[in-house]
Amino acid sequence: MSRSVSSVLRLLLVLLFAACAASTPDVVSADRDQDRAALSVSRTVREKARAYRSNHEPEILKEFVDLLSIPAVAADPANVRRSAEAILRMMATRGISGRLLEVDGAAPSVYGEVLTPGAGKTLIVYAHYDGQPVDRSEWKSDPFKPVLRDGPLRPGSREVPLPGPGEHANPEHRLFARGASDDKGGVIAVLNALDALKASGITPSVNLKLFFEGEEEPGSPHLGAILEKHASLLKADGLVFIDGPAFPNGMPVLALGVRGVQILELTCYGPDRSLHSGHYGNWAPNAIIELTHLIDSMRDADGTIRIAGFAASVRKPTAAESALLSRVPNVDGILKTDLAIGASEGRGEPINERILLPALNLRGFQSGV
Ligand SMILES: [Zn+2]
């Protein structure tokens, strides 16, 4: 029998703790007439924005492709800066006054202002223009030469040409490039939404401050310093964070809070060299098995966390929050099909409820190497 005990008894376990930090409003309007009036205004705005998008798809995609063609990954700071400058130019052509916000050693953040005379409130709109590191061996095409495909990347999917003047994009087609969805897509969406409002003669009812970060993917190492240095410039009443997935049923979604994250890397050590299982098995401790027991002790099969005090600081949703949640469509079926999973954790509660609880996930596990 060859060695079945790990040849290097060093395990790497990465845990992801997500503490629930939901911050939903304490009061939900009970006034249905008011709700209906607001919905009808937002429907009109949405329809106008859709019409604008539908009539300008080739130009929007061309601008998107140009931005995606500039690499914006932390390993390439010169091109990160070129990306920031390109966004500044995109804002300037729209008449949006902007500048780069800098601190020493940081990728620049791009700032722009769309002020409305008489507006009483100010919103910051956040997106980030940098993307995750690239391993070109995992890419079917050049990550910085965007290509349109006829759907998600699956066996048999084809490249298709970008729509030409007067043509429409097929909504099932997908643009592939680093950062296309996370999160240069957010930058393009905001700027073109503003174009759509302007073309429709709709003036925002709030002041908007655009803030596009350039180093979110490495963990925003200088975001705190940038916010402190430009605190008065970035004063606002709220922040819209455009960096999340679409709702599974395709509806636009406004999330009123997200979970924070803490990451723990845990190493378990065993004997200091490889051991033959026939000679030492059942006597020498096995680091893989030790960790398996530890992991198993931390959560039940249904996802209940068994660490004492883990959720102690998490408050329960208020009645108003629960009422809002009950109005969110149940997308569990769509998600299960999309992810090819037969069952979810918990006791059948929908995802909208489960993500209000703190989670404990394993993000990586390395052993026997
Ligand atoms: Zn992102």
Image: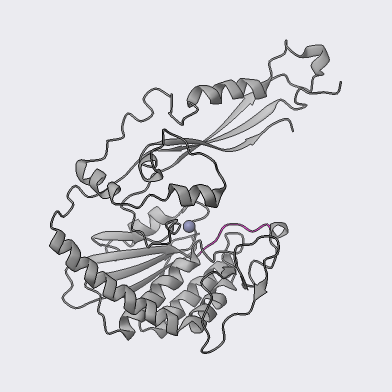
Closer to the camera, 341 or 279?
341
Q: On the picture, is 253 further left or further right than 152?
A: left
Task: Name the spot of residue 175 as percent of width and height, x first.
Answer: 57, 70
Magenta segment, which residues? 130-135
Percent of width and height locating residue 196: 36, 80
Quadrant showing the C terminus: top right
Where 235 sits versus 266, above or below?
below
Residue 250 x/y as whole percent: 43, 62
Q: Quadrant of residue 208?
A: bottom left
Q: Is residue 161 above or below residue 365?
A: below
Name the residue at the right extreme.
1
Q: Is residue 199 left or right of residue 131?
A: left
Q: Name above or below for residue 367 compared with residue 202.
A: above
Q: Is residue 310 left or right of residue 277?
A: left
Q: Is residue 114 visible?
A: no
Predominant SS of the magenta segment:
loop
Nearer-the-camera pick, 56 or 127: 56
Which residue is found at the position 17% from the left and 50% from the top?
27
- The relative height of residue 294 versus residue 171 in the rendered view (above or below) is above
Any part of residue 170 in sight: yes
Residue at horizontal 44%, vertical 81%?
A: 54
Quadrant containing the N terminus is: top right
Residue 11 coordinates in the image, percent (x, y): 65, 29
Place residue 318 in its image quadrant: top left
Look at 46% across and 80% down and name the residue there. 89
100 in the magenta segment: no
